Image (cartoon, rainbow, N blue to C red):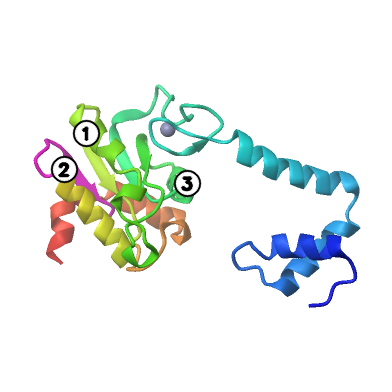
Amino acid sequence: MEFSSKLLENAVQEMAQLPGIGKRTALRLVLHLLKQPEEQTTHLAKALIDLKTEVKFCKKCHNISDFQICEICSNPNREKKMVCVVEDVRDVMAIENTSQYRGLYHVLGGKISPMDGIGPNQLNITTLIDKVKEGEVNEIIFALSSTMEGDTTNFYIYKQLENLTIKTSTIARGIGVGDELEYADEVTLGRSIVNRVPFENSLKN
Ligand SMILES: [Zn+2]
């Protein structure tokens, strides 16, 4: 791609770093931004910088938050002894949208995936095990997507919990194998949390 301006080229190159954005799309977006009032583009740039510099990860559940402890963890009406294990903030949002779950979350920050070089140490697993050891949790609900990586991660955590007194369950699979949680409709997802099954049962099939 030949650019008539170095500034234009830089902006397109930065935009094209985003996942799913090719050079052509990047160019279209950049030209769109150029047409917008300056104020609007400044707001966009500021929102991105603020996000990067100010956002926090909850000290208890690792969810993205504006505070040291997120609003879910600090809510006195939540059931503190029940912890739903999810991959990332999108799953928290999906489950919250169902209004069927009143416990807390633990955000792993990904799934075990040797192909992508992600092992247990790259994820927030130790802090979860520590919570259980300290007696802060009665029940753990696994709510990872039922992909191979999701199953591997569930099983790894389950093994770590083996000698500890804890109830483990997994969300019922109205959700098909390989489906990501965030794409499940609210009713199905809500029902699958209410109808969760003991984790041991999920190992048999
Ligand atoms: Zn939290």
**Magenta stretch: includes residue 176:** no
* Residue 183, horizontal then vertical, whole percent: 47, 61
Q: Main secondary structure of the magenta part?
A: loop
Q: Which residues are magenta?
A: 162-171
Q: Is residue 101 visible?
A: no
Query: Which residue is the site of mark 2?
Result: 161
Q: Which mark is residue 89?
A: 3
Q: Nearer the viewer, residue 6 or 164?
A: 6
Q: Count of labels shown?
A: 3
At x 42% / y 38%, what residue is drawn?
Answer: 62
Above/below status of 127 relative to 142: above
Query: Which residue is the site of mark 1?
Result: 132
Residue type marked 2: Leu
Disc 1 to disc 2: CB gap under 8 Å? yes
Q: Where's the C terminus, which quadrant?
A: bottom left
Q: Is 66 on the left-hand or right-hand side of 70?
A: right
Q: Is residue 42 visible?
A: yes
